[in-house]
Image (spheres, rainbow, N blue to C red):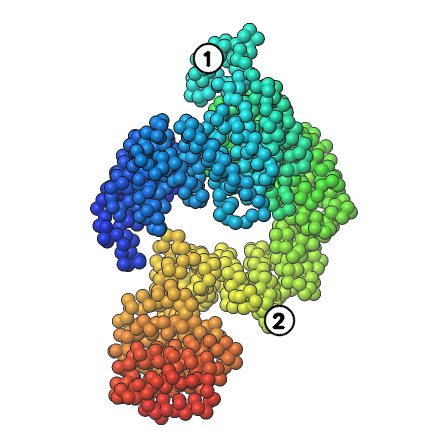
């Protein structure tokens, strides 16, 4: 398939639906290609090349898979497709398997049940044809791996032909070895116990055993008593043999289909034996899900067999006059009144059946099932128990079974069953919080409603259960199962919409609409939100006249939109509350009762944000105070609450107060009683956290849980402080005891180990200090924070208080002489020493604090950042941190500091540039160093660091400095002309970076960092190679790069293993790819001189780093490979030097290093034989090879010294 074709159909079927079978011509061509396949060349010898058969199948499969959600679109084209495929199966030699595979895929997409009953040819003569084809496949291709799909397709066809209503005896030959019926049965038995065919064969057997000739010839009796029952008798719970389990499963499925399709009178004699078998063998309690599921299916079939089915279902069923939605809408337009259809009028035709009624409205049809067999009641009890099973399949099967059985009972029995079901849900499921039983009960109610078996008079007892189920959300340990209950409850609501007439259901629609809207807007599970949306749409469509604003609402509850939790909570819910008062009150009550104390933290936080938004528009100020806010404050002190509830209540109280403050700013004269209400609120605010502290709510696990909400509460009240200072703006409206208590809480949160709590404390401190320290210097607070930073040994405390100081108001920071102490403290915190090297998080947060501090005070006239020296010191601190390569047990931890340093450095430069007094401090040297530091991190092999640094680089280039770095216009063309660079993709980024090699100012930095990355990242190496090949004739560039390589290995700063080893690896890769071949041919002497200097520098490094290399001997291998790659250049001086150095490794202390040196040297000799042995005879060459391969490199060093000297003599090296 082409890429374009794939893109067209690569969509979620929920959002993208097809209108017709558009590729039927392609499918037709693919089927016709089967006839053109050469029988002898269908298999290719190239394992990477697909055969014609595979191409046909893959393309066929791809096209049909697009229609799995809408298989009905294929129907009009299937007969022609099937006819051609069956022709190839029947007549095409060696093509039957591909045709069978294609037919099997059609069956898979359309479903074997539909294919069996509708599309396959079923003339009488086809029966013998398909039997012969199956026998042919079994005889000729039984061992073939490709025959299973063909056999599957033929068995489906056999099922179709067996439905022909002709006596199978007509197909028997005169002197048969076996009858046609026994022949078919033997085929089915052969495949029944194979997991591939089991379900389909069981389905076909169910139809086959329902034939009259099967019953007349006792085929059914023999099969059940001689085949099925003996296998079921062997069931043992302790049995773990998979073959036996498979046989039992197949038997249960087969007998279920037999009871489904067979006639009641023919099967009723087997009910008791099968029932006692299920009970005695305890098959209903099997651990295997599939066995338990099949057992419950069979159980309901037994009860249905015992109870006769009324001609048109139970006569007492509730029937709506019109079932079709379009007809219902038409009827509403044409009739002015609608009457209830619970009791059907005389001679009313419903669903095509005429029902006569007596004068009391009851049907004349007798419901003569008063003699209900005794076995039915225990079966109903077992199905009721099945509603509590742990597996959904069993629960749903039990629910459907109860619905089908109820349809055969008389009204009084059915009423008892519904009452029993409701009692079971209320007492067992809800009280015991059994989510399995509750979901099963909801499924059963839905099934009863769908079949019209739940009468309107039962709704009063059913609807409370539905209400509780829609709100059921219990957390068990670290998991929650409430969503399955709510999903089932939405299914009940959906079924009610289809089951009941709008007049009978109108008294429940208002509450139901409110509940469904609460699920759509506030449920944390997306499947529940979508299920509620579907139920709401169904109710609006069928009960629409009693659903106010129904059409407008369902347009907002789009399937795609409600997939986003934030949208549902903050946008959709707010719009519904704002514009529809009828639902707003219900939704607010739901939030206050359930979501504000929800177990999920995200839900509680979103609830508080929504309540803040709602406060701006909803109701009156008095209503908000009296019905929402003040009761919430009272609930905050309720001792029955746990930490989760207090967290949600505190957070919501703070947000509502802030919402009231915003509303007051918009309209100060809205409420006449505002002063009275505000005074009451102020008292509650003043005492709340003091009482929390006295009750011990701030201690232990519960205290840790509510700390973020405490900070949120303080932050919101502090931001709203003007709301309480109406008479005197300078007056502190809260008592000192409250302020001290809040300050203590903030300090505890700032020094907390948890990052989220610490950040919440910092946010609260910023608002708190602006509110309560606006008219005082409060230098004692800064001194206390500085003292804690200097005296503590815990990193997180220093992190918190350094960020806290930087967040204080500028007047507090500049009012005293503490600013210099703060700067000295911060500079000390980001110093990298042996003692502080491991304090990664401390340096990271201090960098943020420094930038926050500058942002806070740089515009003030008293700011110390008004001289060049301090600005230089500040920027140099960030530049130093961009080179933090700390390694610890977590690996390259320094990358976290480098990420923050890059982003905060650009932020700092932007702030300095915006300050007219300071922007001239940014000279060319500073800007060049900043650009190079960011560029260094952009060249990183770490994707996340490269992404963050890349974004910082783009931001740096977009800043309009007074002075610009060199070649800025060219650099902007490289990076800014690209649309949304994917910085994580090294294959995209490094081809851009290597373009900077042409500029002298950036060549060394780019070359060094690209070499470091290219040593470990193939994409970087490939980008370097491609760039150098393009510029292979630029000899000045190549010469400059070789000079820079010498500088790299000669620099003391670069004498680190993290730099040396990757650079050696990258050089070896470039040399092995003949990157410098052109330069060597023209400037061989200069090239050799460069590499001799580099080799000498590497030898010095080997001496200096001996201890580190000995700790990891594998590092020697990189030196060896680099030396060997240089042997390709035919230069005597270089050759002799390298051979001396490589043979030195033969005397290394580690035998592994000796073997690697010999192996790599041998491989190099094989590759460059002509250049290395140009003047030697073959005997010397062979002698050298033998010494390298046959020497035992674990001998003592004296013997190895002799061997080394022998090799040097053979190379003519003294």
Residue at numbered disc 2: 835
10 Å neighbourhood of mark 1: few (<14), some, or many (≥20)? Answer: few
Residue 881 visible in the displayed image? no
Q: Sequence-wise, which precedes: disc 2 or disc 1?
A: 1
Looking at the image, is mark 2 or mark 1 nearer the viewer?
1
Marks 2 and 1 sit apart, C-alpha to C-alpha, by 95 Å
Vertical relation: 116 (above or below) 414: below
On the picture, is 283 further left or further right than 1092? right
Residue at numbered disc 1: 354
On the picture, is 484 further left or further right than 220? right
Residue at the limit of the structure toward the right, as seen here: 694
Residue 680 visible in the displayed image? yes
The percent position of residue 1071, horizontal first and vertical second, equals: 33, 74
Residue 928 is tagged as none
On the picture, is 106 further left or further right than 303? left
Which residue is at 55% across, 65% downward? 890
The percent position of residue 294, horizontal first and vertical second, equals: 52, 37
| Quadrant hosting residue 588 | top right
Residue at the limit of the structure toward the front, as seen here: 175
The percent position of residue 300, horizontal first and vertical second, equals: 54, 31
Using the image as rendered, state which of residue 534 and residue 774 is in the foreground: 534
Vertical relation: 351 (above or below) 290: above
Which residue is at 24% across, 41% downward? 91
């Amino acid at each position: 398939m082409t890429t374009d074709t794939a893109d067209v159909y690569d969509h979620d079927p929920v959002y993208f639906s097809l209108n017709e079978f558009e590729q039927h011509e392609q499918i037709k061509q693919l089927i016709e290609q089967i006839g053109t396949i050469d029988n002898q060349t269908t298999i290719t010898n190239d394992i990477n090349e697909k055969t014609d058969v595979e191409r046909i199948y893959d393309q066929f499969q791809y096209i049909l898979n697009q229609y799995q959600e809408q298989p009905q679109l294929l129907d009009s084209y299937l007969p022609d497709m099937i006819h051609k495929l069956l022709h190839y199966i029947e007549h095409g030699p060696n093509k039957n398997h591909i045709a069978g595979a294609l037919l099997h895929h059609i069956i898979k997409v359309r479903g074997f049940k539909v294919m069996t009953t509708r599309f396959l040819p079923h003339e009488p003569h086809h029966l013998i044809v398909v039997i012969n084809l199956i026998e042919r496949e079994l005889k000729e291709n039984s061992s073939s791996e490709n025959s299973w799909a063909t056999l599957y397709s033929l068995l489906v066809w056999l099922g179709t032909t067996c439905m022909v209503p002709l006596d199978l005896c007509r197909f028997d030959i005169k002197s048969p070895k076996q009858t046609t019926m026994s022949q078919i049965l033997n085929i089915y038995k052969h495949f029944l116990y194979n997991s591939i065919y089991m379900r389909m064969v069981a389905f076909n057997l169910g139809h086959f055993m329902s034939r009259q000739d099967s019953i007349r010839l006792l085929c059914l009796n023999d099969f059940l008593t001689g085949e099925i029952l003996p296998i079921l008798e062997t069931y043992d719970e302790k049995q773990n043999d998979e073959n036996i389990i498979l046989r039992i499963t197949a038997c249960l499925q087969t007998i279920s289909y037999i009871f489904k399709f067979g006639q009641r009178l023919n099967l009723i004699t087997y009910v008791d034996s099968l029932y006692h078998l299920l009970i005695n063998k305890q098959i209903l309690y099997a651990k295997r899900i599939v066995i338990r599921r099949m057992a419950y299916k069979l159980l309901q079939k037994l009860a249905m067999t015992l109870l006769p089915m009324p001609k048109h279902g139970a006569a007492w069923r509730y029937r709506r006059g019109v079932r079709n939605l379009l007809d219902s809408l038409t009827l509403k337009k044409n009739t002015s009144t609608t009457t209830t259809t619970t009791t059907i009028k005389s001679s009313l035709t419903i669903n095509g059946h005429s029902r006569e009624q007596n004068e009391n409205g009851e049907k004349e049809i007798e419901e003569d099932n008063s003699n209900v067999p005794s076995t039915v009641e225990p079966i109903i009890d077992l199905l009721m128990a099945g509603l509590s099973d742990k597996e959904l399949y069993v629960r749903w099967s039990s629910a459907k079974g109860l619905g089908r059985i109820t349809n055969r009972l008389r009204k009084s029995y059915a009423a008892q069953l519904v009452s029993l079901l409701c009692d079971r849900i209320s007492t067992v499921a809800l009280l015991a919080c059994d989510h399995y039983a509750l979901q099963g009960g909801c499924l059963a109610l839905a099934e009863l409603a769908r079949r019209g078996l739940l009468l309107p008079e039962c709704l009063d007892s059913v609807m409370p259960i539905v209400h509780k189920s829609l709100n059921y959300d219990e957390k068990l340990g670290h998991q929650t199962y409430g969503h399955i209950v709510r999903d089932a409850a939405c299914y009940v609501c959906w079924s009610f919409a289809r089951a009941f007439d709008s007049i009978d259901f109108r008294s429940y629609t208002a509450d139901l609409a409110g509940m469904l809207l609460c699920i759509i807007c506030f449920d944390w599970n997306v499947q529940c939100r979508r299920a509620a949306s579907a139920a709401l749409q169904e109710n609006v469509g069928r009960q629409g006249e009693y659903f106010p604003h129904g059409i407008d609402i369902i347009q907002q509850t789009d399937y795609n939109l409600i997939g986003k939790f934030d949208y549902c909570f903050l946008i959709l819910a707010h719009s519904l509350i704002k514009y529809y008062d009828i639902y707003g009150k219900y939704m607010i009550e739901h939030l206050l009762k359930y979501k504000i104390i929800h177990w999920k933290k995200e839900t509680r936080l979103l609830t508080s944000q929504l309540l803040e938004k709602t406060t701006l528009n909803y109701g009156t100020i008095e209503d908000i105070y009296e019905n929402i806010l003040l009761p919430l404050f009272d609930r905050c002190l309720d001792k029955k609450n746990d930490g989760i509830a207090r967290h949600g209540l505190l957070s919501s109280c703070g947000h509502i107060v802030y919402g009231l403050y915003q509303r007051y700013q918009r309209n100060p004269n809205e409420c006449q009683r505002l002063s009275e209400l505000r005074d009451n609120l102020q008292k509650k605010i003043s005492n709340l956290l003091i009482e929390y502290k006295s009750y011990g709510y701030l201690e232990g696990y519960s205290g840790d849980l509510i700390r973020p909400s405490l900070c949120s509460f303080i932050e919101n009240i502090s931001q709203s402080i003007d709301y309480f200072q109406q008479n005197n703006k300078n007056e502190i409206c809260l008592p000192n005891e409250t302020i001290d208590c809040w300050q203590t809480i903030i300090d505890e949160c700032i020094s907390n180990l948890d990052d989220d709590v610490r950040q919440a404390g910092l946010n609260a401190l910023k608002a708190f200090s602006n509110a309560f320290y606006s008219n005082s210097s409060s230098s004692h607070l800064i001194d206390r924070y500085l003292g804690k930073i200097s005296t503590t040994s815990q990193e997180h405390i220093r992190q918190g208080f350094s960020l806290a100081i930087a967040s204080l108001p500028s007047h507090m920071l500049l009012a005293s002489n503490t600013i210099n102490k703060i700067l000295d403290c911060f500079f000390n915190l980001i110093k990298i020493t042996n003692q502080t090297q491991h304090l990664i998080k401390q340096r990271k947060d201090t960098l943020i604090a420094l930038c926050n501090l500058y942002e806070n005070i740089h515009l003030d006239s008293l700011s110390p950042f008004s001289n060049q020296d301090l600005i230089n010191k500040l920027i140099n601190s960030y530049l130093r941190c961009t080179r933090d390569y700390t390694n610890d047990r977590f690996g390259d931890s320094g990358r976290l500091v480098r990420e923050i340093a890059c982003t905060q450095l650009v932020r700092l430069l932007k702030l300095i540039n915006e300050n007219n007094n300071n922007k001239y401090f940014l000279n060319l040297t500073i800007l060049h160093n900043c650009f190079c530091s960011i560029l260094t991190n952009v060249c990183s092999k770490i994707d996340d660091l490269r992404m963050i640094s890349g974004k910082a680089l783009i931001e740096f280039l977009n800043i309009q400095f007074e002075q610009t770095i060199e070649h800025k216009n060219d650099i902007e063309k490289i990076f800014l002309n690209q649309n949304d660079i994917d910085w994580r993709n090294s294959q995209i980024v490094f081809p851009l970076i290597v373009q900077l090699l042409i500029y002298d100012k950036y060549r060394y930095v780019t070359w060094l960092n690209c070499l470091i990355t290219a040593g470990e990242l193939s994409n970087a190496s490939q980008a370097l190679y491609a760039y150098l090949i393009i510029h292979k004739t630029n000899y000045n560039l190549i010469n400059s790069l070789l000079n820079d390589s010498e500088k790299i290995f000669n620099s003391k700063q670069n004498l680190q293993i993290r730099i040396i080893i990757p650079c050696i690896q990258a050089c070896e890769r470039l040399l092995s790819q003949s990157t410098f071949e052109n330069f060597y041919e023209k400037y061989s002497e200069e090239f050799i001189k460069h590499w001799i200097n580099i080799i000498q520098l590497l030898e010095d490094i080997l001496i200096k780093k001996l201890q580190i290399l000995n700790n990891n001997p594998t590092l020697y291998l990189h030196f060896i490979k680099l030396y060997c790659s240089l042997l390709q250049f035919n230069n005597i001086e270089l050759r002799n030097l390298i051979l001396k150095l490589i043979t030195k490794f033969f005397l290394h202390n580690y035998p592994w290093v000796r073997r690697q040196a010999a192996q790599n040297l041998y491989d190099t000799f094989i590759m460059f034989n002509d250049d290395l042995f140009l003047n030697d005879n073959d005997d010397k060459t062979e002698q050298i090879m033998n010494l390298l391969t046959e020497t035992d490199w674990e001998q003592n060093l004296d013997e190895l010294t002799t061997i080394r000297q022998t090799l040097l003599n053979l190379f003519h090296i003294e």
